[in-house]
Image: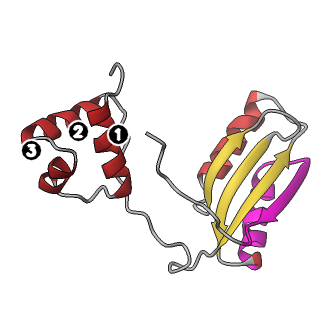
Amino acid sequence: MEKLDETDGRILRELQRDASLSLDRLSEAVHLSRNACWRRIKALETAGVIAGRVTLLDPVKVGLPLTVFIQIRTNAHEPGWLDRFKSATRAMPEILGVYRMSGDLDYLIRARVADMAGYDRLYQRLIARVPLSDVSASFVMEDIKDTTELPI
């Protein structure tokens, strides 16, 4: 897909807010016919702009109120270590994001757990699967802004 136009932007903004909108309601909101709206959505999906549709859960209501950011530094930078690290973090459902960083920090992990004991269990499982040289964690005290909407 080349460049997104304003109509694509309106469709994407609406779908980011509520992917369960019926095609009729979406086409009305973006001022397109039902068929034109459907064709644009299919084109956005084919181009990979729309990567998927999900249901967002309230983490507190499902028993995962604590967000933790885990900062990792490692002395191991060979491919075998990285493969083990990727495998370990991808297999842990509490881990929502893993990022390789520039600067002093090697990796940043974002996770959701029930409480400090839940974090400790996650930490113990992680260090049992892959050697780490320095691990520290920061716990979110208040979610000021947490969104999945991209600024389209």
* Alpha carbon separation for disc pair 2 and 1: 8 Å
Q: Quick one: SS at disc 2? A: helix
The circle on residue 41 is: 2
Q: Magenta includes 136?
A: yes
Task: State the residue position of label 1.
Answer: 50
Q: Which residue is drawn at 74% across and 72% down?
A: 141
Residue 130 on image: x %, y %: 78, 49
Between discs 2 and 1, the one toward the N terminus: 2
**Type of amino acid under label 2:** Ile
Label 2 crowd (10 A; few <14 / some 14-19 / many >=20) = some
Horizontal relation, residue 92 to residue 42: left or right:
right
Label 3 crowd (10 A; few <14 / some 14-19 / many >=20) = some
Horizontal relation, residue 124 to residue 84: left or right:
right
Task: State the residue position of label 3.
Answer: 34
Mark 2 or mark 3, whichever is nearer to me: 3
Residue 64 on image: x %, y %: 60, 75
Tell me if label 2 and label 1 are in contact, CB under 8 Å: yes
* Alpha carbon separation for disc pair 1 and 3: 18 Å
Residue 40 on image: x %, y %: 20, 34
The circle on residue 123 is: none
Q: Quick one: SS at disc 3? A: helix
* Alpha carbon separation for disc pair 2 and 3: 11 Å
Q: Which residue is drawn at 63% across and 66% down?
A: 112
Q: Which residue is drawn at 74% across and 58% down?
A: 69
Residue 10 on image: x %, y %: 30, 42
Taking 6 as reference, is 126 above or below it? below
Q: Magenta includes 77?
A: no
Residue 136: quarter of image:
bottom right
Q: Residue at x 15, y 51 (%)?
A: 28
